[in-house]
Image (cartoon, rainbow, N blue to C red):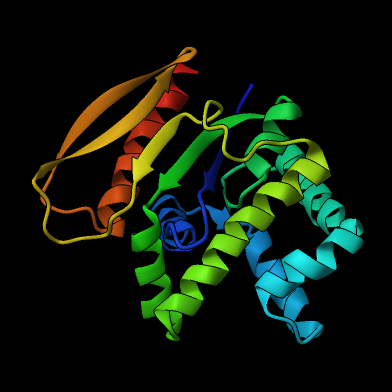
Amino acid sequence: MFKKIITITGKAGCGKSTVADLLARKLNYRILSSGDQMRKIAKQYNMNIVDFVGKYLPEHKEIDYKLDNLFLDICKKEEDIIIPTRVMTYILEKNNIEHFKVFLYATKDVRIKRIYEREGGKISDIKKKLEERDYLDSIRYKDLYRIDINDLSVYNLILYTHFTKNNFGKIRIKIKQGNKFFIKYIKSKDTLPSTLADIIINEYKEYARRN
């Protein structure tokens, strides 16, 4: 049975939080953010998120399991939810909770620039931490759930998030129908977050209608 839940996945700096906030406002859904919760916990231990994920969590898996099980229980009982996270897409899928699954793609250079504009610092340091974060996330979820977070076959929509005012008239997306992905082009003057949120909503409503 299809539930009115959207999971938004992508690597650090892809724009998950930005797009999720817009979707939540446009759809009047609420947000469940494991990333926000992890940052709060990391702050309690006076650790940055990279060290917390890479050094502390591997020895304290109960934190991951507790948060993920909490979100799973909420999704079993409720709807009208946006979840910007790396792993809930796969957890809901394994628990047969059918929902709309979005992957936001951005190149490494775009992600580095976005983090720099948001947090400042040295580009070289941001690049190093980003690469480390990507690697640690991949290892972490394989260890926790035997999940390959680089496997995109589970998603319903793959969308490139460049966030630019200048566009060449169309946005290229991948939309899943049945077990296959199809390329689709959508006319657009920009690829700003609000425009991408509208694209997601349109594809989400069409998917919900079919299911």
Image check: 105 left or right of 40?
left
Instruction: Tell me which corner region of the image, top left, top right, bottom left or bottom right, holds residue 149.
Output: top right
Residue 114, percent across and down?
Answer: 37, 69
Residue 177's spot in the image, x, y percent? Answer: 42, 16
Left or right: 150 with respect to 123? right
Is 54 in front, or is 187?
Answer: 54
Q: Residue at x 86, y 55 (%)?
A: 66
State the residue at coordinates (73%, 65%).
Answer: 53
Q: Is residue 159 left or right of residue 139?
A: left
Figure check: 71 above or below 21: above
Quarter residue 39 falls in: bottom right
Please name the residue shown 47% across and 69% down the image.
127
Q: Is residue 77 above or below residue 192?
A: above
Total count of labels: 0
Residue 25 point in image, percent of width and height: 42, 59
Q: Does residue 187 appear left or right of residue 6 in this picture?
A: left
Give the image quarter of residue 77: top right
